[in-house]
Amino acid sequence: MIRLESYLQGQWTSGEGDGSTLVDPASEQGVATASTKGLDFDGALRFGREKGGPALRAMSYAERGALLMAMSKALHAEREQLIDDSILNAGTTRTDSKFDIDGATGTLAYYAGLAKTLGSERTLGGLGTVEGEGEQLTRSKRFWGTHIRTPVRGVAVHVNAFNFPAWGFAEKAAVALLAGVPVVTKPATATALPTWRCIKILVDAKILPEGALQLVCGSPGEMLTHLRTGDVLAFTGSGTTGAHLRRLEAVTERSVRINVEADSLNATVLGPDVEVGSETWFAFVRDAVREVTQKTGQKCTATRRIFVPKQHMDAVLETLAEEMGRVPFGHPAAEGVRVGPLASAQQHKDVREGLDALVDAGAKIAWQGSGAFEGATEGKGYFVHPTLLRADSPRDVGLVHEREVFGPASTVMPYDTPEEAAELVALGEGGLVAAIYGNDKDALRTLVEGIAPWSGRVLIGSKKVADQAISPGLVLPSCVHGGPGRAGGGEELGGRRGLDLYTQRTAVQGDRALLDKLFE
């Protein structure tokens, strides 16, 4: 088996003991081990602050952008190896593996392009940007005020989820590195092999300055206790873990910045005006099926609740079941398979228990896949069949709006009016994305106004973009990613907005002519 070492303080190093075993989700066979026991986390964070930070801040945005483009190209050149690693350790099909890897390289490339628009901007010897035009502060036209942003003087620790080992690493790292902040990335141990490979590729290519990017493979141990003022902690994972991180002494006592992306009961609403068989209808069906089955439903943006006009309940369930029944599931390496196993034994247990809990709460299984898993060994692997549930009285099955089943499952529920649909979406208490399919402007306005306060992003699928719009689960680096309430209350990406997490906004006041010269 492969020993996954951590990359800390400029060298590859392995922790003591056997550590954790990473497995192939399709066979349950061990493929790698990782341990962090005995590693010097405090030294690693100091190394990032003292070596990586100054090196990055000495560069212009354009120069950092060039690093990101080089990273993107280096990872793309090893795409086939990364696909193999993902199939082996994450249990993803080839198509889903490419979705993760291309998301990583695409995000790096996007921020490299954004860097060109920022160019060689510098303020007060640091690297930053002036916000807005500034304004006169007193009667004197000479006394002026403006706001600038400069990189924080710490290190960014990124704790990522198991479902996107490449994209999850890259989307956070791209923004932090562009802002001029060094990164320590810590992937979920269960699927760390693809992330380890990404970092190994980048280290071997000698793209980044010393200390700009470090990797922790295995348990984080006491690493987070060494965070200090000026550092940033960005986390993607469960709401329970997110709540624990917010209680860290570094956060409560030293004001370490924290961004959390957590559980999300994302919703899709089929508008009241949509006719069965219309272009908008088929766009809704296509996206709903994709969002339930892609990555075996293991996406933070996957659709967990589907709200449809009461009169269309049976038609929607029948059509979705028919389309999902055509999706091949089985061993991720088997030709044609589009739905593989869940990523780990714990995931398998959680999904099965979650489905049972929803049924016990009053939801009914309307359709569930059946039969053997193609190419899989009988009795082996963390496989589950895609499942559609229905809850004809949405308000009476409260658990549907509280418990996320992180797998290929979604619950279909009826509504009477657009106002009620928006209220039902809000019962989820915060999501990353909501999708609305329809063409009636009045209904769309009601739905958007009612849903937006509870969602980080809203996608409207109408007939004019039925064959052009992205699926709601696709995260674009140009738009913000995050959501209120249950979704964690955080915000990432969003183009230039993403830099806010890693920069300090400062008001600078003084002689306008002098300020203009300082920030020209």
Image (tube, grey):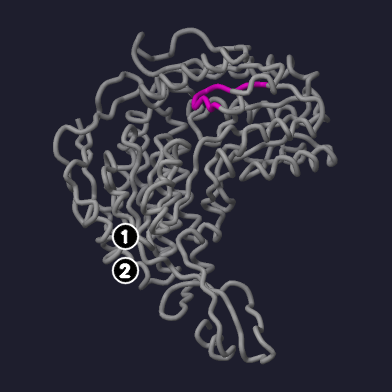
From the top left corner, tell me how far across and down residue 123 is, in percent. Answer: 47, 78
The residue carrying pointer 1 sits among few (fewer than 14), some (14 to 19) or many (20 or more) residues within 10 Å by Cα, namely many
Three-letter code for the amino acid on which mark 2 is drawn: Ala
Q: What's the CA distance linking mark 1 and mark 2?
A: 8 Å
The structure residue drawn at horizontal position 54% and vertical position 90%, both measured from the top left corner, is 514
Please tell me which residue is depicted at 54% across the width and 50% down the height of the picture: 491
Residue 456 falls left or right of residue 103: right
Amino acid residing under circle 1: Ala
Q: Residue 348: image x %, image y %?
A: 41, 20
Give SS at disc 1: loop
Stretch of the chain drawn in magenta: 403-412
Nearer to me, 188 or 60: 188
Q: Determine which of the numbered discs, if any, sits on residue 173 in the image.
A: none
Residue 109, position as x, y percentages in the image: 47, 55
Query: Viewed as shown, does residue 118 lie left or right of 47?
Result: right
Res. 212 mark: 1
Image marks 1 and 2: residues in contact by CB distance under 8 Å: yes
Residue 55 shows which numbered tag? 2
507 above or below 293?
below
Residue 332, placed above or below residue 513: above
**Residue beneath the point at 48% across and 72% down:** 128
Q: Residue 25 falls in which quadrant of the image?
A: top left
Snapshot quadrant of residue 456: top right
Q: Is residue 54 above or below residue 406?
A: below
Q: Nearer the viewer, residue 465 or 401?
A: 401
Q: Which of the two labelled residues, at mark 1 and mark 2, occupies the earlier sequence position?
A: 2
Query: In the displayed image of the protein, which residue is found farthest to the left?
Result: 17
Q: Quarter of the image holding residue 220?
A: top left
